[in-house]
Image (spheres, rainbow, N blue to C red):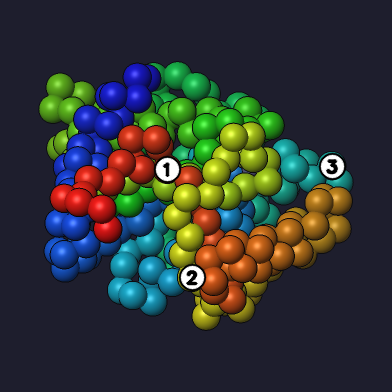
Amino acid sequence: MRPSSLAFALASFAMMPFAEAAAQAPPPRTVLAIGAHAGDMELTAGALLIRQKKKGDRIVILHMTLGEGGNPKATPAAYGAQKRREALAADSVIGAESIFAPYRDGAVPNNEAARRYVANVIRQVKPTHIITHWQKSIHKDHANTSAIVQDAVLLASLEGVVTGNPPHRGIRGIWYADNWEDAEDFQPFIYVDVSEDVQQWRDAVSKYEFVRGGISSFRYLEYYDALSIVRGAVAGKQRAVAFNMDAFGKRRVLDSLP
Ligand SMILES: [Zn+2]
C-alpha cells in the first residue's frame, strides 16, 4: 500500500497541529494490539497495555496465530492448545480481551482475505490506537502481519469495503512494537514510562512456558526486562517501552520554534 493511503486513513490525528492535539482532553481509548504469534504483543507491549488498562482504557489483543509450531518437543495441536491457555492467562493478568485469528503458525497469508478479516476485527473493536509489528522482520509472519494491519486500517475506514460491520475511522495512530526479531531499521520514537508496570508485566508473560525458559534458547524474559531498562535510561525513567511510527506520523506542526 502507498504510505499516502495509510496517512489518509489516519489523517484525522496525523494532520492535527501538535499544540491543538496536546491541548484537547484525552478521550477514552481502546487499544488493539495485533501480534503474529501468541506472546508477541504481551512481551513487547504488555507493560504499556497494563499501564493503559490502569487508566481505564479497553485493551484487546488479536493473535494472528497461536505460534503452535514453536515447540520441537510437542505436536502443533498439543502446543497450540497450551499456547491458547497461556495466552488467555497472560491476557487476563494484563486485563486484555483475547481474539484468536484462524491462521496457522508460519502461514499468516499476506493476501486480501486476511486484510478483510483484520479490517472486520478493527470495525468490531473500534480501536483508537493500534499496536503491531514493525514492517521489517526476520520472521515472515511478523512482516506479513505488519503489512496486513497497515492495509486493514485503511480498508476498515472505507465505506465501499463491505465486511458486515460499519466503517471505523477513529484510529489515531499505529504504534510499532520494539521486537528483537523486527529490528531492521527500527527506530525507537515514542517512549512510555512503565516503571510501575514491570512486575505485573513479568507476571503476565511468565504464563507462557517459552518465556519461562525450556522451549527456546532465546532468553525472552531477560531480554525484554533488560530492554525496558535500556529504553528507560534513554527516556530518563526507570523503565520504558519504545515504539516506532510511520514517517508521516512523526510530523509536527508548530506556529514557531518551541
Ligand atoms: Zn512471533
Q: Secondary structure at mark 1?
A: loop
The first of marks 1 and 2 along the sequence is 2
* Image quadrant in which you'd find residue 208: bottom right
Residue ID at (28%, 46%): 252
**Residue 210 is at least partly visible in this image:** yes
Residue ID at (22%, 30%): 8
Label 3: few (<14), some (14–19) or many (≥20) C-alpha neighbours in 10 Å: few
Q: Give the quarter of the figure containing the N terminus.
A: top left
Instruction: Tell whether 36 sits left or right of 73.
Output: left
Residue labelled with disc 3: 72
Residue labelled with disc 1: 245
Q: Position of residue 182 (x, y in %)?
A: 62, 39
- Tell me the distance, in whole angstroms, between the alpha carbons under discs 2 and 3: 37 Å
Q: Is residue 47 above or below residue 38?
A: below
Towards the viewer: 243 or 212: 243
Q: Give the quarter of the figure containing the C terminus.
A: bottom left
Q: Identify the amino acid type marked 1.
A: Met
The first of marks 3 and 1 along the sequence is 3
Q: Position of residue 38 (x, y in %)?
A: 59, 50
Q: Quadrant of ligand 1?
A: top right
